[in-house]
Amino acid sequence: MIPRLLILIGLVLAGFSALFYLVTRVHRFRFSLALARGRHGWSWVISVLAVLLPSAAIWLAWGYMNAIICLLHLALFWLLSDALFALLKRLHGKPWRRYYAGLTALLLTAAYLSAGWVQAHHVWQTNYIIHTDKPVGTLRVALLADSHMGTTFHADGFARELDRIAAQKPDLLVIAGDFVDEDTEKDDMLAACRALGQLDMPVYYVFGNHDKGLYDSKCTRGFTGDDLAAELTANGVHVLEDEIVPIGDAFWLIGRQDASEELGFGGGRASMAELTRGLDTARYSIVLDHQPHDYDAEAASGVDLVLSGHTHGGQLIPLVQLIRWFHLHGDDAVYGQERRGDTDFLVTSGISDWAILFKTGCRSEYVIIEIQGT
């Protein structure tokens, strides 16, 4: 929880710094002085309001996190625009008649965040082919994670994405946690569970760190983690909590409790050594683990494939790069496919979002995995 708190404090401080900088930039537009009728004190008040009122509107509509994200991007693009136009001024040899740097910053920010909005709210299909030397034939697996029901779509939008997944004719669908979160309405959860019940394929699910609604002590969503599990089960979804089930005659599916049980909620979960003790290794084993957090133990256990979500693909530039360069997520992956020893690991960016409604470093997706044996 300490790194999460430090990141939050850093964002808030950066947000206030961006506010101050943007007020000084907006004041360079002529409209503030014109509206103040030449009174410089009032022109600063107008400049402050010109920044605060849109920020407050974004806060009310999308939450404080997205307000900070918008402010930080605008401040960054404004800095770059000021630097660019300062250089052009030197080449041009005389001052500009209008404050083009500010207009450019506003246009660039709007275009960039609009693209990030589309990448968060539209869902792409990502395909992987994984080869194995085991004589297990072929298995087509659909993977989704982090739907956070009610964020970028409600149950009707989720049902449309399920139709797209079903059209790919997978043998099974696996859900790697955070199906809902603390803000999901009960009616949305119930309708989304019913949509899963309409699928003509087996569906398997593991809990994520948000599904039980334990991060908000005043959570008013109207259902518990047990209620969610019961509703999923009533609609034919197999809820796995440190359990192993066979898939046909050649595959194992291992569903793990989420790492938050032992890291944040005072509980525990079975280790990979305990889960796989005595497991028939002639079958191909697939682990469903919400957080990509336990790679060394999972590779050491000899499982073949680990599927995760949770990270939202790193979400934003430059967050994706910073996480990878400085190993802020440890040595485990943030997005995509990698291999360690004889184990393949795959992390999806998720089908939706939680607090941040933009994706600039990745895009929303569901995943189709083709496992091809000899």
Image: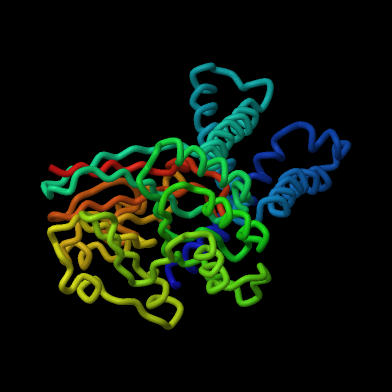
Give the vertical position of 350 relative to 95 (above or below).
below
Residue 311 is situated, as x and y percent measured from the top left of the image, at: 41, 55
Q: Residue at x 44, y 72 (%)?
A: 2
Residue 257: name its quadrant: bottom left
Is 61 left, or right, of 298 in this rendering?
A: right
Residue 208 is situated, as x and y percent measured from the top left of the image, at: 45, 64
Query: In front: 254, or 310?
Result: 254
Q: Is residue 259 visible?
A: yes
Residue 158 is situated, as x and y percent measured from the top left of the image, at: 56, 47
Q: Count up the numbered dots.
A: 0
Residue 238: name its quadrant: bottom left
Which of the image's four quarters has the C terminus?
top left
Q: Residue at x 44, y 76 (%)?
A: 264
Give the vertical position of 224 relative to 114 (above or below).
below
Q: Residue at x 40, y 50 (%)?
A: 173
Query: In front: 202, or 3?
Result: 202
